[in-house]
Image (spheres, grey):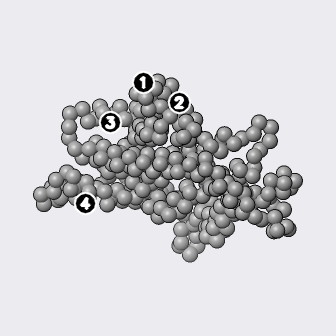
Amino acid sequence: MSTDTAAAPAAIDKPRTDFSGAPRRSIASRIVSKVGGGVVQVVLILLAVIWLVPTLGLFVASLRSQQDDNSSGWWHVFTAPSQLTFKAYSDLLAKPDFVDSFWNTVLIAVPATLLVVAIASLAAYAFAWLEFPGRDWLFLIVVALLVVPVQVGLIPVAKLYGWLGVFGSIPSVVAFHVAFGLPFAIFLLRNFFAGIPRDLLEAARMDGGKEWTIFIKVIFPLGGPAIASLGIFQFLWVWNDMLVSLVFANTGSQPMTKWLQSQMRQFTGNIDILAPGAFLSLIVPLVVFFAFQRYFVQGVLAGSVK
């Protein structure tokens, strides 16, 4: 009786088989196998095309005159390609205030990205692999800062900037972006650096490597995908930001987002300026994303396969 009782669970756990002895697949698995492959690729391509339609519409609208955009939809250009012209772009680039806003955006986004990546990388390495008093408590404070919204710091920081006499300058906007970008950056990189095998660091220390040397030659190359992903996220966030620039940037330091917002008319859309300006503001993040797409995918998938 004991033998039959012990064999019962094995009989229950045994997968069902057909007459040929092969395991019988469930209905769900058979549906997935039928749908997989080419059908999934077609669906993903269709979804990508749907997501790109607004960008295509914005680009086509920027190549049409204001009269054409006001009289018909952008898709009518396929039946009247003579409507396409680059006059809106030439007129926009001839505006000195727009060119200044473009370079202000670059001067804000690039330093804010580089500073966050550099400071967060060093701090994440310290939290992951260095022993110092209060390390865990400091990291808990960093994690707690993740839940602090940007809106909470606008008024206190504005008063601080006014007291320091830096309100309205580009460095003040950069400092705000760096301060609110560091908690997430440190949290992200610390978790990635902690997954690096300890044996690599111990071997480097046995070879006489100092902490700075270990960080440059071991941690930084292995953490490249995560660092690149962080850089892309930070750059896109700062480049597309308008709230912080509305509060802390004045006319001389305003980025493109604030400049485009100032071109909005009260009752009608200034589409001959907004369409090319919005597309120029959009194309730079797209170029950055596709240029570092390989590193972005590696950073997203980091840690999924051991």
- Residue 171 lies left or right of residue 203; in this view the side is right
Label 3 residue SS: helix
Label 4 residue SS: helix
In space, the residues marked 3 and 4 are separated at their CA atoms by 25 Å
**Image spot of residue 283 (x, y percent):** 60, 58
Taking depth in this image into account, of 239 and 170 the one nearest to the observer is 170
Q: Nearer the viewer, mark 1 or mark 2?
A: 1
In space, the residues marked 1 and 3 are separated at their CA atoms by 30 Å
In space, the residues marked 4 and 2 are separated at their CA atoms by 39 Å
- Check disc 3 and give the amino acid type: Phe
Q: Residues within 10 Å of mark 2 (few under 14, many from 20)?
A: few
Q: Residues within 10 Å of mark 1 (few under 14, many from 20)?
A: few
Residue that sits furthest to the bottom in the current view:
20
Residue hosting label 2: 151
Q: Nearer the viewer, mark 3 or mark 2?
A: 2
Residue hosting label 1: 163
The reply to whether residue 260 is visible in this rendering is yes
Residue hosting label 4: 217
What label does residue 139 carry, if any? Answer: 3
Sequence-first disc among 1 and 2:
2
